[in-house]
Amino acid sequence: MARQPDIQYVRFYTDGSAARKIDLQPQKKKNKVSLPQQPRVRKEKRTVIHVDPISVFAVLVAGVMLITMVVGMMQLGGINADAEKMENYVAALQSENTRLRAEYESGYDLRDVEQKALEMGLVPIDQVEHVTIELPETPVEEEPAFWENVGAFFAELFGA
């Protein structure tokens, strides 16, 4: 079998009309002197960044929380310093109290105090006459229970 030749089609078609266009309006001649063209100023493309308002709000809230935390830590540091000062002050007062108590107790003698009391006319405790007075017990009225109060209320309410 013989091979068939490849068929190639040539395009002789043109888009539009090949006829010449006629202007019906006469052209006006320009008597102006042409100036050299100014270079075109190109507008710079502006890059637009779209910002999500929720994320901006979240960043602001996080910033406020950070500032609040820093201020709280500073206040906590001041409070801890004050507490340490107070603890030192309490320890100093306790040591001074112990010293003063020891000084007070060493400043008097119990025998001297007893001797001065006898000179003033006081009697020793074993020579004091004791009197015991018995009082009769007063009867205590018991409060009625809650349910008894509720029953009495309804009995009075309905006249039973």
Image (cartoon, helix red, strand yellow):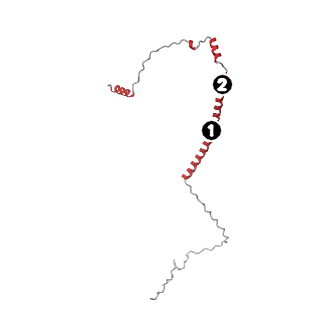
In the image, residue 145 above or below residue 59: above
Residue placed at 64% from the left, 36% from the top?
A: 84
As rendered, which of 141 and 37 lies closer to the eye?
141
Residue 47 in the image, given as x and y percentages of width and height:
60, 60
Horizontal arrangement in the rendering, residue 4 relative to residue 34 (left or right):
left
Residue placed at 64% from the left, 27% from the top?
A: 98
Horizontal arrangement in the rendering, residue 112 relative to residue 23 (left or right):
right
The disc placed on residue 102 is: 2
Residue 102 in the image, given as x and y percentages of width and height:
65, 25
Asked if the residue under mark 1 is in contact with the one under mark 2, i.e. CB atoms within 8 Å, the reply is: no
Q: In the displayed image of the protein, which residue is found farthest to the left?
A: 160
In the image, residue 20 above or below residue 116: below
Quadrant of the image occupied by residue 25: bottom right
Residue 151 in the image, given as x and y percentages of width and height:
35, 27
As rendered, which of 107 and 2 lies closer to the eye?
107
Q: Quadrant of the C terminus?
A: top left
In the image, residue 31 above or below residue 138: below
Q: Which residue is mark 1?
A: 80
Residue type, numbered disc 2: Ala
Considering the numbered disc 1 on the image, is that residue within a helix, a strand or a loop? helix
**Crowdedness near tag 1: few (<14), some (14–19) or many (≥20) residues, C-alpha within 10 Å:** few
Cα distance in 3D space between marks 2 and 1? 33 Å
